[in-house]
Image: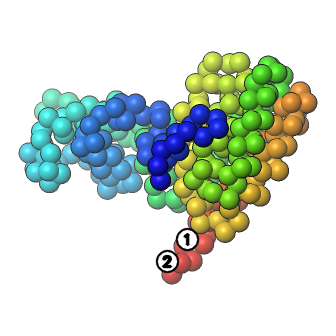
Amino acid sequence: MKNSKNAIGLSQGSLWSNPRGASSVAQASGLHAMVVDQIGLQIVQGALAPGAPLPNADDWSAKLGVSRTVLREAIKVLAGKGLIETRPKTGTRVRPRSDWNFLDPYVLTWCYAGGERNDVRALFELRRTIEPAAAGLAAERATAEQIQDLEAVLLEMEKYADDGERFAEPDLVFHQTILRMTGNELIGSLAAVIETALLMSFRLSNDNPHGQRPSLPLHRKVADRIAARDSDGARKALETLLDQAEDDVRTALNARRGRKK
């Protein structure tokens, strides 16, 4: 699919390549990013257990087909995400899970690559902790211009309701806009986390036979409650939206497992 700007200024296809929050990887060379992704996924998915030493640098460089310089830079990136540590004498080892930065967009992506049920529960627990409260604050604090912007995004969602990939872009903007409508910079800074969480929801629900159209009335109710300055109503509407989104993901996962049997 070609990259093209849509009505709300988004570049189509950008969401399905790299999470925007992971700038340390996104700005790296393709080879560097590939090594980070391969090692990170092995760690998070359990192929390299906490406490386990990483393979010898020479052996691993040869296995991955990259220079030691590229491998060294990848190790630095993974260390910055809390996944590994390098110490004199003991070498480079995987750190305990409790040290991992699970709010890092790439770590989140690796966590949900498997699409397990417990992963889905954790994903939506995170979203329920943040988004309904943000909707309530948005109803109290949003400017008239911000409310108009949210309405424009909702119209874009309606336009692409039957096109999963194109729908994902304005849907992401819808949820991030609500965070920023709170006027709280700390909450607004969670937009990158919500982006990755929402993308994981979309990837896990690709097999949902009902598509995205059934979610439109729920998004509409959230926007209407915010516009009406109904804080409690906005909060409850977003909780209902997340309940439906989780059901959609579980339906898709069940369908996927059924095909594998």
Residue nearest the viewer, comparing 50 with 210: 210
Q: What amino acid is at disc 2?
A: Lys
The residue under label 1 is 256
Residue picked out by circle 2: 260
Q: Quadrant of residue 211?
A: bottom right
Q: Residue at x 30, y 50 (%)?
A: 38
Residue 13 can be seen in this image:
yes
The three-letter amino acid code for the residue at tag 1 is Arg
Up/down of 26 relative to 200, above or below: above
Query: In percent of the image, x 24 and y 43: which residue is there?
Result: 31
Look at the picture and state if 148 lies above or below 61: above
In this rendering, position of residue 193 left or right of residue 136: left
- Residue in the foreground of this view, choosing between 90 and 39: 39
Q: What's the colour scheme?
A: rainbow
Relative image position of residue 79 (x, y in whole percent): 31, 33
143 sits to left or right of 33 = right
| Image location of residue 154, percent across then percent down | 75, 41
Residue 123 position (above or below residue 189):
below
Q: Evaluate if marks 1 and 2 touch, with contact meaning CB atoms under 8 Å apart.
A: yes
- Residue 33 lies, in percent from the top left, at 30, 41
The secondary structure type at the circle numbered 1 is helix
Relative to residue 29, is residue 102 drawn left or right?
right
- Give how far apart the Cα atoms at labels 1 and 2 are: 7 Å
Q: Nearer the viewer, residue 219 or 8?
A: 8
- Disc 1 packing (10 Å; few <14; some 14–19; many ≥20): some
Q: Is residue 108 above or below residue 214?
A: above
